Amino acid sequence: MKLDKTRAKKRTRLCQMPTPGNIAGRSSSITNAFFNAIIPIDDPSEEEELEALQILGMDRNDIRCAYCGEKSTEWDHLRAIITDQRPTGFITEIANLVPACGKCNQSKGKTEWKKWMVGPAKLSPTTRGVLGIEDRIARLSKYEQWRKPTRIPIEEVISQELWNEHLANWNAVRDLLTKSQKLATEIRQAIERYRLTLETRKASL
């Protein structure tokens, strides 16, 4: 008995089927890993953290996302440390970090925070209908003026040879991901052809 593929596509699924893995799709994660690995981290003191929370109008026992007010799960870089596949020079420090939830952190990405908050991006505070956005922007603007962030001209403070070697390694890994994805697709197609052969044999019995 042949599988009616048209009917199978139209039917309502009881659960979402997994999709094939995409090796090449890891390219952005690799880029972030390569440049995050060279960004300095200035670990703040408890006093600095408390001062930051005070400016943002938050209690240490109930830390909320600075963008939308939901429960905070992480700290987000207020100013992006990677843009257009290059480090911006900003580092990981309290002057460049605010509490955030996962939805806001992922949605904001490298976009300038104020433009993103009032913009139409998926899961932005405006798109989600968050109340009191103007007040949140005012607090974040005050926070932005609290301390001048460190900004290092990374490509100028290291030798060109060292920087070129790092970029060469980054490009080599990305090229390998692309080649690996092509090979994986060919392998999956071969396995799928064999699976369909087995189904045909079973149907003929």
Image: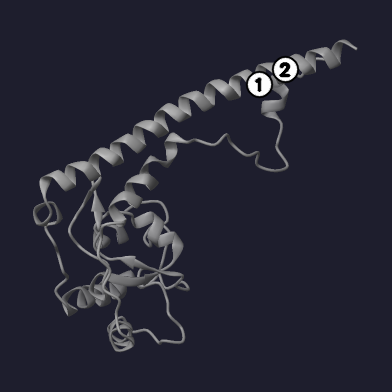
Whether residues under marks 2 and 1 lie with C-beta atoms below 8 angstroms apart, the answer is yes
Specify the color scheme: one colour
Residue located 28% across and 69% down the image: 41
Residue 47 appears at what percent x and percent y? 30, 89
Q: Name the foreground residue: 141 vs 133.
A: 141
Query: Relative to 78, does residue 58 appear above or below in the rendering?
Result: below
Residue located 70% across and 20% down the image: 5
Locate the C terminus and report the quarter of the image it occupies: top right
Question: As drawn, which residue projects farthest toward the top?
Answer: 204
Residue denoted by label 2: 196
In the picture, residue 186 is in which quadrant? top right
Question: As drawn, which residue projects farthest toward the bottom?
Answer: 47
Residue type pointed to by label 2: Leu
Locate the N terminus and report the quarter of the image it occupies: top right
Residue 196 appears at what percent x and percent y? 72, 17
Residue 70, label in figure: none
Question: As drawn, which residue projects farthest toward the left?
Answer: 156
Q: Disc 2 to disc 1, how far (Cα)? A: 6 Å
In the picture, residue 143 is in which quadrant? bottom left
Residue 192, label in figure: 1
Q: Quick one: SS at disc 1?
A: helix
Q: Name the foreground residue: 202 vs 160.
A: 160
Residue 145 appears at what percent x and percent y? 16, 76
Name the side, left or right, on which 43 lies relative to 199.
Answer: left
Query: Relative to 111, does residue 43 appear above or below in the rendering?
Result: below
Residue located 43% across and 38% down the image: 25
